[in-house]
Image: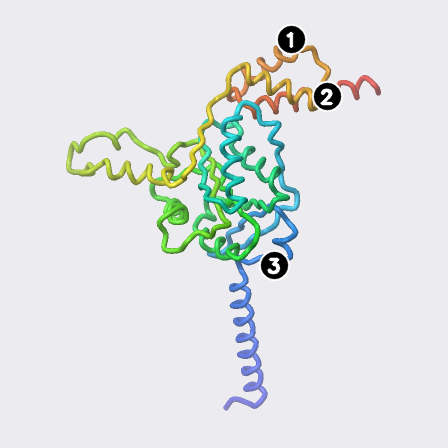
Amino acid sequence: MMSEKTRNQEELFIQLLEKADTLLTHLGALQGQLPNVALDDYIAFRWRAQNGSGYLIPVKHPNLVGLSDLIGIERQSTELDRNTRQFLQGLPANHVLLWGDRGTGKSSLVKGMLARYADDGLRLIGVSKEGLVHLQEIAEVLWERPERYILFCDDLAFNEDEPEYRELKAMLEGGISDCPDNVLIYATSNRRHLMPRQVRDNRYPQNEEDELYPREATEEKVSLSDRFGLRLSFQRISQDTYLQIVSHYAEKHGLSVPTDALYRAALEWEASSSGRSGRVAYQFVADLTGRLALESNTQTK
């Protein structure tokens, strides 16, 4: 027979298990929520997915990009600025897809909106592709907040077998849950339609294994980008614009280099890089600034 002591120990153990289960349940319910004081104190956040759910974490040192540094994309900047101001004023505004060549300022332009309008109540939440399955969960956290939130999905691209794109489609338009008025999605991608398209998508069925209506598959792929009301394209910049950006950053860094020598070095840097872009221009000036400073420090020793 079980002794009284053993019975008491077993009952105590069961009580501890019940308390632990209650605590875990409580913690699970809190996932995805951030105390109001934290939401009040920061302007940028990241959504961190964990154990099938997730939660917001503050970005204590956000990368605030000055719009004056973004040269050669004035048209795109004007359009995104107008849409963002409409959003901030509670007017109809669109979700935005910024697509095009890499290094052309897509992500910087979104961060530039935060730098310009943070004092007007704009907030930015970075959401990775893996976090897209939690979009409705994020929306519920933000629903009653007074600020205006941009869910920033950077460098998006999907394969056909990935489920996240369907969650994004539902959030943009057509899901069973509504999108709160204080939330917009700004996404960047190198792809216009976010999903790969093959030559076979445009050919007629040739055998029994081919899809009978290939156009329907194509429509499925392009329908995601169509749900962004505003689509801004970014192309590779001209050489003149590239050198203009180089001059801008050189002046900002206080470089005293003859223009001819600066441009010649910038073109040599571009030739050995992945292509001509604002990013490459900035990297060149950063490297040149560091090299000149290192040489100066060496000579003074």
Residue receiving disc 1: 260
Disc with the residue nearer the chain's start (2 vs 3): 3
Q: Residue at x 51, y 52 (%)?
A: 49
> Horizontal and vertical percent for residue 251?
69, 20
Q: Element at badge 1?
A: helix
The amino acid type, in three-letter code, at marker 2 is: Gly
Labelled disc at residue 140: none
The amino acid type, in three-letter code, at marker 3 is: Pro
Residue receiving disc 2: 254
Q: Element at badge 2?
A: loop
Q: Quadrant of the C terminus?
A: top right
Q: Element at badge 3?
A: loop
Q: Nearer the viewer, residue 163 or 35?
A: 35
Q: Is residue 142 left or right of residue 174?
A: right
The reply to whether residue 126 is visible in this rendering is no
For mark 3, does the 10 Å Cα neighbourhood hold few (<14), some (14 to 19), or many (20 or more) residues? few
Q: Give above or below for 14 relative to 145.
A: below
Q: Residue at x 70, y 21 (%)?
A: 289
Residue receiving disc 3: 35
The amino acid type, in three-letter code, at marker 1 is: Asp
Q: Give above or below for 278 relative to 181.
A: above
The Cα–Cα distance between marks 1 and 2, rounded to whole angstroms, is 17 Å
The Cα–Cα distance between marks 1 and 3, rounded to whole angstroms, is 55 Å
> Horizontal and vertical percent for residue 230?
43, 36
